[in-house]
């Protein structure tokens, strides 16, 4: 039982070193501007608001893009833009 302890400790040490390197590279990329960052209070330009499963293949997606909302049908022989919804969506 005790003969496996050095192997376990070296494995955990290697895992900790790799995770620390990943964290440091991510911080460096964020600080240098290589990684895109959105403000915490702002939403992105594109968001999936809701998805309705119609059958095992097809789905209706309610997608918001630049303040407009579109209804998309996906999963059939081709994807279809059903239409753009009129007016602004109320805050929920």
Image (cartoon, rainbow, N blue to C red):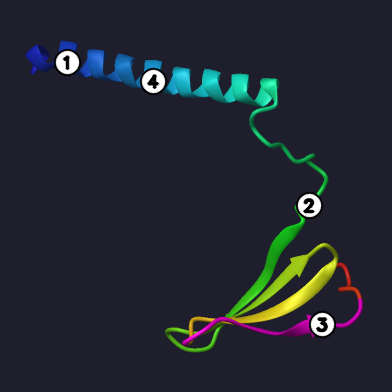
Are the two marked residues, 1 and 3, in contact with CB atoms closer than 8 angstroms? no
Is the N terminus in the top left, top right, bottom left or bottom right quadrant? top left
Q: Nearer the viewer, mark 3 or mark 4?
A: 3
Query: Considering the numbered disc 4 on the image, is that residue within a helix, a strand or a loop?
Result: helix
First of labels 4, 1 by sequence position? 1
Badge 1 or badge 3: first in the primary sequence? 1
* Residue on which disc 4 sits: 18
Residue 90, horizontal then vertical, whole percent: 89, 72
Indicate which disc, 3 or 2, sits on the residue closer to the N terminus: 2
On the image, numbered disc 3 is attached to which residue? 85
* In the foreground, 75 or 56: 75
Q: CA distance from mark 4 to mark 1?
A: 17 Å
Q: Which mark is in front, 2 or 1?
A: 2
Figure quadrant of residue 29: top right
Quickly name the residue at label 1.
Answer: 7
Q: Residue furthest front?
A: 78
Magenta stretch bounds: 77-87
Q: Is residue 92 visible?
A: no
Which mark sits nearer the N-terminus, 2 or 4?
A: 4
N-term mark: 2 or 1: 1
Is the residue 71 above or below the residue 17 in the image? Answer: below
Residue 26 rendering spot, x and y as whole percentages? 56, 25
Residue 70 seen in the figure? yes
Residue at x 31% of width, y 16% of height:
14
* Residue 43 numbered mark, or none: 2
Q: Quadrant of residue 39?
A: top right
Cα–Cα gap, marks 1 and 3: 60 Å
- In-image side of 71 versus 25 (left or right): right
Residue 76 appears at what percent x and percent y?
A: 48, 86
């Amino acid at each position: 039982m005790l003969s496996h302890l050095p192997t376990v400790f070296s494995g955990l040490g290697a895992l900790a070193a790799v995770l620390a390197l990943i964290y440091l590279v991510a911080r460096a990329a964020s600080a240098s501007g290589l990684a895109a960052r959105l403000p915490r209070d702002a939403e992105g330009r594109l968001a999936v608001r809701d998805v309705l499963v119609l059958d095992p293949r097809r789905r209706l997606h309610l997608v918001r893009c630049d303040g407009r909302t579109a209804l998309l049908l996906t999963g059939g022989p081709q994807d279809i833009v059903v239409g753009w919804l009129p007016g602004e969506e109320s805050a929920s």
